[in-house]
Image (cartoon, helix red, strand yellow):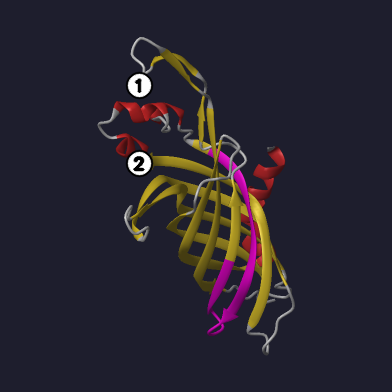
Amino acid sequence: MRIVLALLFNFVFFGPIVAQSTAYVLQVGPTAGLQKWDNSSGREPLLQYHAAVSMESINNEDNQGSFYMQLGYHVKGSATRYRFFNINSGAPGGTFTERFKFNNFSFSFGAKQRFKETNSGRTRYFYFGGLRGDYTYSTNIDELIGSDPNRRLVYPLMGGVQRWMAGFSAGGGIEFDFSELVGGQIQLSINPDVTPQYRQIAIPNVPDPWNPGQNITIPQRRIRNTTVELSIGLRLLKKVIVVE
């Protein structure tokens, strides 16, 4: 922990002196949310969105490596898609999608490595990796349960939602310059959580609504997030020139 805090302190307060310049990146894009329920990956993807702002250190003499910090908003979760068919003809009759959504704020920091520039120095490929912490400020699972108490036997419960999570991010993409101080980037990343989004212990002696007079046990449940994100970003360079 001391090493991480020291790196952050050095980046925030001494980064502009060492790296000389700073790039600010605004990015948005679609998110494919994936979840494992009870170590099973049978859930279907949830298609949502994300937005983030980040700050990167830039070395004017060697722009290949840098550190970054990022704050973002990410909708995570998974979906269940019900498909209906005409019982007479067997033809498809429509679909209904049930979305389990967790609205998270994320903070991440890490390192970025660029390859040599191409296209007369205006295009660069890169890859990156870093650590991430998430905070869940809202979810829709209570809305999905609604007024049907029997759904509490098979649906996640608010009491099991974990507000704080940790994970990591990795990916790559391409940067391109519009001018000396303005550019853009396209990035693809994968963002698995190490800690669960939802954790519930087994709940015994629950009245069975389908068999009056009998009790059942709601089994323990863990839900873990992974997202795949495509980001389109605008890069703004604050360039510092040292005059000797």
Total numbered labels placed on residues in the image? 2
Q: Which residue corresponds to mark 2?
A: 140
The reply, left or right, for residue 27 in relation to residue 57 is: left
Quarter of the image that includes the C terminus = bottom right
- Identity of the residue furthest to the top in this view: 213
The residue lying at 68 percent from left, 70 percent from top is 126
Q: Where is residue 69 shown, x and y percent of the image?
A: 58, 55
Q: Where is residue 157 shown, x and y percent of the image?
A: 40, 29
The overriding secondary structure of the stretch rendered in magenta is strand
Label 1 CA crowd tier, 10 Å (few <14, some 14–19, many 20+): few
Taking depth in this image into account, of 218 and 5 the one nearest to the observer is 218
Residue 180 in view of the camera: yes
Compared to residue 230, the image places residue 141 above or below, namely above
Residue 148 shown in magenta: no
Residue at mark 2 to residue at mark 1: CA–CA distance: 26 Å
Q: Where is residue 189 shown, x and y percent of the image?
A: 60, 60
Residue 53, numbered label: none
Which amino acid lies under the numbered mark 1 shown in the image of this protein?
A: Trp
Q: Secondary structure at mark 2?
A: loop
The residue lying at 46 percent from left, 28 percent from top is 160
Question: Which of the marked residues, 2 or 1, is nearer the chain's N terminus?
Answer: 2
Quarter of the image that includes the N terminus = top right
- Identity of the residue furthest to the front in this view: 88
Residue 168 shown in magenta: yes
Q: Secondary structure at mark 1?
A: loop
Residue 12 in view of the camera: no
Q: Which residue corresponds to mark 1?
A: 210
Q: Which residues are magenta?
A: 165-187
Taking depth in this image into account, of 139 and 208 the one nearest to the observer is 208
- Identity of the residue furthest to the bottom in this view: 120
Q: Are marks 2 and 1 in contact (CB under 8 Å)?
A: no
Which amino acid lies under the numbered mark 2 shown in the image of this protein?
A: Asn
